[in-house]
Image (cartoon, grey):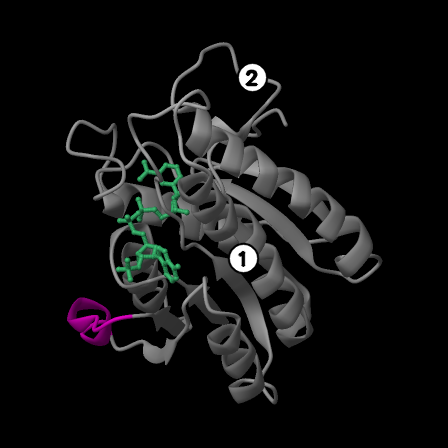
Amino acid sequence: MKSTLILGASRGIGLGLTSELISRGWQVTATHRSPAPELAATGARLAVADMDDDATLTALAASLAGERFDHVLINAGITGPRSETATNVSRDAMAQLFWTNAIAPIRAARLLLPLIKDGGSIGFMTSRLGSVGSRDHGYAELYSASKAALNSLTRGFAVQDVGSRDIAVLNLHPGWVKTAMGGDGADIDVATSAKGLADVIETVRGPGQRYLDYTGATIPW
Ligand SMILES: NC(=O)c1ccc[n+]([C@@H]2O[C@H](COP(=O)([O-])OP(=O)(O)OC[C@H]3O[C@@H](n4cnc5c(N)ncnc54)[C@H](OP(=O)(O)O)[C@@H]3O)[C@@H](O)[C@H]2O)c1
């Protein structure tokens, strides 16, 4: 039985992916930071982690120290200040956005990397909006910058931390998904995104780093 640890699964894409992987026979350990009745109903093994609280991440890694996972997914993320730009955002709001979306995922990844089996993979839920190479618009500049920062940090993580280990590093774009973050006008529902992401997670193996969307298509960095 394949096993995964998903950080940030109380709702939205993390919750959908938990259900999808369980339906495919995976053993899923899924984290939440506040009561998560829908997650509990999936049958996942639950654990607590707040990306903004190092102590909970350290405690999570310690509690799972004897285990090995085929896949670890760092999914948690926030939109940040939706209607603001670099011109008018506050330092505190920007610090929060970059912390949760870029710094905390790398800190968590460094704690959890020893728990990943050789031949397995680690996923970071980034976004197509984090692509610098394909950015030809000014939409959501702060959120996009936070995901670009995450992408940059993962590039170093792949080389420096994963190094020569046989672990695939997957920077994943889930599509534009109808969640609290994506909104009702988004392109696809959670189930469609989760099925695609599960296919990618189940099939992409081997050393190296890939930036892929939920259909498996490559995104330029
Ligand atoms: N929806 C889209 O169209 C879209 C597109 C591209 C990328 N993404 C990315 O996909 C991921 C999931 O997005 P979503 O649409 O499912 O968003 P969502 O419905 O807003 O869910 C966000 C999830 O992240 C968790 N989370 C946020 N901050 C956290 C923290 N500090 N510690 C622990 N958990 C935290 C939330 O937990 P709580 O319930 O405790 O708040 C929730 O489970 C995010 O990284 C997002 O940036 C989404």
Identify the secondary structure beneath mark 2.
Answer: loop
Queried on whether the Cβ of the residue with tag 1 lies below 8 angstroms from ligand 1, the answer reads yes
**Quick check: 52 above or below 2?**
above
Q: Amino acid at mark 1?
A: Ala
Q: Position of residue 100 (x, y in %)?
A: 46, 52
| Horizontal arrangement in the rendering, residue 35 relative to residue 211 (left or right) | left
Question: Whole-Å distance between the Cαs marked 1 and 2?
Answer: 25 Å
Q: Nearer the viewer, residue 132 or 92?
A: 92
Residue that badge 1 annotates? 104
Query: Who's the residue at 38% across and 77% down the image?
Result: 48
Identify the secondary structure beneath mark 1.
Answer: helix
Q: Position of residue 19 (x, y in %)?
A: 28, 63
Q: Amino acid at mark 2?
A: Ser
Query: Who's the residue at 31% across and 76% down the image?
Result: 44
Question: Are there few (<14), some (14-19), or many (20+) residues within 10 Å of tag 1?
Answer: many
**Quick check: 209 above or below 84?**
below
Q: Quadrant of residue 6?
A: bottom left
Q: Quadrant of residue 70?
A: bottom right
Query: Which is closer to the viewer, label 1 or label 2?
Result: 1
| Horizontal arrangement in the rendering, residue 192 relative to residue 75 (left or right) | left
Magenta stretch? 34-42
User: Quick check: is 38 in the magenta stretch?
Assistant: yes
**Mark identifier at residue 134:** 2
Q: Position of residue 166 (x, y in %)?
A: 76, 61
